[in-house]
Amino acid sequence: MKENKTKLEDIDLTRKQFEFKDEDVSIFKTPKGLNEDIVKEISSQKNEPSWMLEYRLRSYREFIKHHQPNFGPNLDFLNFDDYTYFTRISDKVSKSWNDVPKTVRDTFDKLGIPQAEKEFLAGVSTQYESEAVYHNMLKEVEEKGVIFLDTDTALKLHPDLFKKYFGKLVPFTDNKYAALNGACWSGGSFIYVPKGVKLDKPLQSYFRINNERSGQFERTLIIIDDDGEVNYVEGCTAPQYSKDSLHAAVVEIFVGKNAKCRYSTIQNWSDNIVNLVTKRAMCEENGLMEWIDGNIGSALNMKYPCCVLKGDNSKGTCISIAVSSNSQIQDAGAKMIHIGKNTSSSIISKSICKQGGIANYRGLVDIKPNSINSHAHVECDTLILDDKSASDTIPTNIVENDSSNIEHEATVSKIDEDVLYYLMSRGLSKKDATHLIVMGFIEPFSKELPMEYAVELNQLIKLDMEGSVG
């Protein structure tokens, strides 16, 4: 009997065009622009407790007065009155795929989400515009006491646990876009892993912006109790429109003693998305946080996953890739804050730029005075495929005690013509040879992904390379 297994190519993160009229899916949408009345309306629509409404209003007031980032690309072109900040297209989160609105279901069917869930995921959540529309988790995972919900539902069902951690690691005062998220947050993932529970299969969320001039502000909160382990994977796409949309998410992760979290992202927003994300994790004693961060899409991307190594012997890693083309700006990197003793961190950043793209590494490693006997390693490599593209490495490395050290190395290079000639002499076309070299370059990143996503990344890179070489 032939097995009905998901083909690897069924999982599709490419930027496909799905055009639907608003009236096909939209149940409720706030007017364009942002003010206190709209913030109140968002909270009212969600029937939130009073403390969350107050949090939103304080966040909005901070957003209004907070300055733009004083580093990276200039964001003054953003007109916040142009965006719609909340769009609801379903009045519930469905556990059955057949209960999801047909228009939304068709979109995710084409992206391969249901097939992926059946084969290799412990649970899946899908968000379309501002809110989750579908959520499901394996029964055996639920029986272990794992909580995996969209964040709105978690606020209702687990208010004490939610309030204990929400906004504690990324307060709304942190930066302008954390404040914007605090005011308008909607959807995202909430995960709690009890003590000693280790999940063998990943949990996944998938985020989709489908309208132009929309804002998506998901809030993800992950708590891994002592000796627990979780692997979380997220994917992001949007169709191409002539006008930009805004994505400003916040991720907070709490890693307990001897616990481990791996957070993998393949961000393939279309090139009309401005992507401004704050991601931060805190590790207790012997905790391990791993960021696997892929950035292929968006017109402008600013993202710097952070590990706060609070506990002694805690570890943090970030392995990232940024691909920039056609005037895209990828301003990405990582942050490692060493507080505990004998902590260690590793940052490996791979960038590829072509066709006038800009790919910058911007990072921070800060080893505090009491973080004795600690070590950090930073490795930044850029591959430039033409004469129109550019890349800068902008590190900030600080060691505040005499027993710790930071290693930093950076390279910027073009494809080796001798290697290219050798591969072509073996029968490969110039395009295939270039693709092979590029895949070898990003291998430190791709090998950390689940096999299905590594294959998908290969397909995305190959698609993105079309037209780059003759």
Image (tube, rainbow, N blue to C red):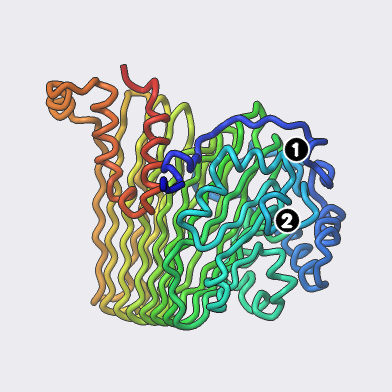
Quadrant in which the C terminus is drawn: top left
| Inter-mark Cα distance, 2 to 1 | 15 Å
Q: Identify the residue under disc 1.
A: 82
Q: Is residue 389 visible?
A: no
Task: Name the residue carrying label 2.
Answer: 184
Residue 260 in the image, given as x and y percentages of width and height:
41, 72
Q: Residues within 10 Å of mark 2 (few under 14, many from 20)?
A: many
Tell me which numbered mark, 2 or 1, is placed earlier along the sequence: 1
- Residue 275, above or below 66: above
Q: Where in the figure is residue 94, as x and y percent of width and height?
A: 71, 57
The residue closer to the viewer here, 241 or 362, is 241
Residue at 24 percent across and 35 percent down: it is: 413
At x 56%, y 47%, the residue is 113
Residue that sits furthest to the front in the current view: 1
**What secondary structure is marked by label 2?**
helix
Find the residue positioned furthest to the top. 470
Amino acid type indicated by mark 2 = Cys
447 or 60, which is in the foreground? 447
Residue under the point 37% across and 58% down: 318
Helix, strand or loop under label 1? helix
Categorize mark 1 by other alpha carbons within 10 Å: few (<14), some (14-19), many (20+): some
Q: Position of residue 10 (x, y in %)?
A: 48, 40
Front residue of this view, candidates 224 and 179: 224
Observer-side mark, 2 or 1, equals 2
Asked whether 138 or 247 is in front, the reply is: 138
